[in-house]
Amino acid sequence: MSAVDWLNLLLHFGLLSLLTVGGAVTTAPDMHRFLVQEKLWLTDPQFSASIAIAQAAPGPNVLFVALMGWNVGLNAGGIGAALFGAMVAMVGIMVPSSMLNYYTTRWSHRNRDLRGVRAFKQGMAPVVIALLVATGWILATGESPRGSDWPLWLVTLASGLVVWRTKVHLLWLLGAGALLGWFGLV
């Protein structure tokens, strides 16, 4: 691969980085189009294996991007190129969105008194709460049969009230939940 090819990989993943609302895996279809269909840098099995291995491994889901870069580099010229490919792909997918987040947060903090910034924050609050409730619902109900999960709901309700009404650190509640689970109470 030439320097222009590596730059194309970096720039393409950089552009995708700005679209990764919901995680990098949401841009996988365009990654497939670019890497497999357009550039022919990866095969279909390499692409699928990159996602499958990263999803099965512990750690962040974005690791599949490093595996794709690794495979592109490996196909281009060995271990050194594979390491470089993994680095290029990860820098491309991580840096633009991180910089956007950093500067947007700084700007909104400096301008927190502007009507638009306040409206955005107030409008996002219900969305965040709904996502947290949905996550809690999924975690609390899981695969348990209906009616047998009332202890989980009780712990969830008690934890929510403690967080809302006291200054008890959340880690104490997580520890208490872990103990209740260890003893088989929930």
Image (cartoon, helix red, strand yellow):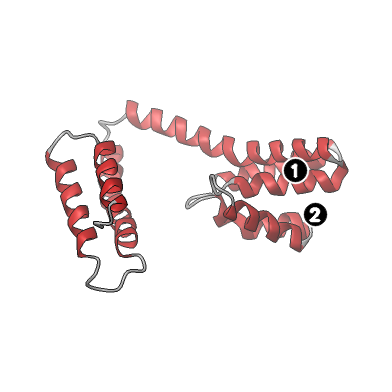
Residue 35 appears at what percent x and percent y? 74, 54
Local secondary structure at mark 2 = loop
Q: Nearer the viewer, residue 126 or 167?
A: 167
Q: Which image quarter: residue 133?
A: bottom left
The quarter of the image holding the N terminus is top right
Q: Name the amino acid type tagged 1.
A: Asn
Mark 2 highlights which residue?
39
Q: Residue at x 58, y 55 (%)?
A: 56
The reply to whether dot 2 and dot 1 touch (C-beta < 8 Å) is yes
Q: Which image quarter: residue 117?
A: top left
Residue 145 appears at what percent x and percent y? 30, 73
Q: Residue at x 53, y 45 (%)?
A: 60
Res 8 label: 1
Q: Is residue 118 above or below residue 145?
A: above
Q: Name the amino acid type tagged 2.
A: Lys
Q: Nearer the viewer, residue 51 or 92?
A: 51
For disc 1, the neighbor class at 10 Å (few under 14, some 14 to 19, many from 20) is few
